Image (cartoon, rainbow, N blue to C red):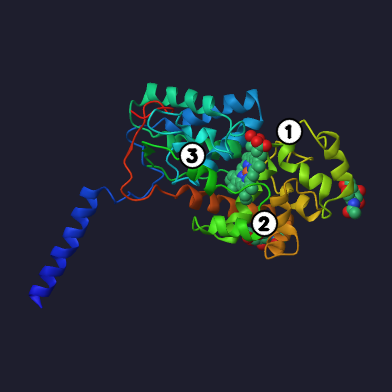
Amino acid sequence: MATITRSTAFLALAVVVLAIVGGTTAQQLSPNFYSKTCPKLSTIVRLGMAAAVRKEKRMGASILRMFFHDCFVNGCDGSILLDDMPSFTGEKGAGPNFMSVRGYEVIDAIKAQVEASCKATVSCADIVALAARDGVNLLGGPTWSVPLGRKDSRTASQSAANSNLPGPGSSLATLIAMFGSKNLSPRDMTALSGAHTIGRTQCQFFRGRIYTERNINGTFARLRRRGCPRSGGDSLLAPFDVQTPDGFDNAYYQNLVAQEGLLHSDQELFNGGSQDALVTQYSNNATQFSGDFVAAMIKMGNLRPSPGTPTEVRLNCRKVN
Ligand code: HEM
Ligand SMILES: *[C@@H]1O[C@H](CO)[C@@H](O)[C@H](O)[C@H]1NC(C)=O
Ligand SMILES: *[C@@H]1O[C@H](CO)[C@@H](O)[C@H](O)[C@H]1NC(C)=O
């Protein structure tokens, strides 16, 4: 017995040592991660986001989307922020991001303030996570404590950004599968899609829906066609939510029930499929939506780079150290 126990203990120790040496133990994230090393962090990020949103409300939405696009590509590791380098092509030029994801300069400005207060301490990935939370809250949505302690990647993957992010023409089955591959449930997917209660989208992404689809309110389709011609005007913008375009509420789901989802992928959540009942619930119960959205944001924020990936705390979010 004693030998078995001792060899078991040794084995356990060896596993732990190997894991640490190999760098495969990702530390659990914690809201208090920087409470000693950067006590003013949340205030600095909040003030930076407040200034950005004061200048342009849409920025709250843009940073929320940046966080999603960071997390879905090798985990929330700030990889989306890296400019192209001689050694790799960055994610900024990937289809879902190019001329679409915005707000990089807002993160740069916040990072500069954070560095001035706590040098070489806070990852860019954590700054994006906090900034996304503040963007939601500044536009009238919930707030929550963000688990922290992420590290920044030393590389980026344009091909992963191209293949891991869902497109606006996605079917419900594709959406469920793509979120499922990130261990996010259909319910998480439907709650996270409520992010489309804020922000804008380009004509090129909803043209097909407003000119050819039949599960769309006619008045709404006519309104959107006025700002999005059959050809040309690809980058003309429309708000996802007509009534409260810059208000984080459950109007997204009310729109879906009224067949006023703007993207094909939006309306897929309420088109006779498995998410209809949940969409109806969220449309009637803002509290339920809010609670599920926060839970799903924390879950998405826990996506980590694959074990063994080299990481660091980047000094400039656009470049590896
Ligand atoms: C479910 C699959 C999703 C698809 C297919 C999708 C697709 C899109 C597309 C095509 C746009 C417009 C981009 C442009 O016009 O340049 C957009 C905007 C946006 N997305 Fe999503 N998205 C999805 C999920 C999410 C999630 C999970 C979040 C965040 C939690 C999110 C947050 C946003 C926000 C806030 C905007 C507006 C950004 C702005 O105004 O700058 N999306 N999305
Ligand atoms: C479409 O939306 C308009 C304006 O919100 C509404 O008056 C109308 O009843 C809707 N049409 C249908 C068929 O639901
Ligand atoms: C709304 O959802 C919350 C949270 O799930 C629940 O406690 C509450 O009873 C619901 N309210 C209504 C009116 O259904």
Separation of marks 2 and 1 at Cα, in angstroms: 22 Å
Mark 2 in CB contact with mark 1 (< 8 angstroms) = no
Q: Residue at x 16, y 69 (%)?
A: 8
Mark 1 or mark 3: whose residue is earlier in sequence: 3
Instruction: Give the structural element (helix, strand or loop) at label 3.
Output: helix
The numbered mark at residue 158 is 3
Q: Is residue 189 left or right of residue 250?
A: left
Q: Is residue 237 visible?
A: yes
The residue indicated by pointer 1 is: 234
Label 1 within 8 A of ligand 1 by Cβ: no
Q: Residue flagged by tag 1: what amino acid is it?
A: Asp
Q: Residue flagged by tag 3: what amino acid is it?
A: Gln
Q: Nearer the viewer, residue 228 or 135?
A: 228
Crowd rating for badge 1 (residues with CA inside 10 Å; few <14, some 14–19, many 20+) = some
Q: Nearer the viewer, residue 257 or 90?
A: 90
Task: Point out residue 140 in the picture as x, y percentages from the top left corner.
Answer: 65, 39
Residue 223, placed above or below residue 4: above
Crowd rating for badge 3 (residues with CA inside 10 Å; few <14, some 14–19, many 20+) = many
Instruction: Give the structural element (helix, strand or loop) at label 1.
Output: loop
Separation of marks 1 and 3 at Cα, in angstroms: 23 Å
The residue indicated by pointer 2 is: 171
Mark 2 or mark 1: whose residue is earlier in sequence: 2
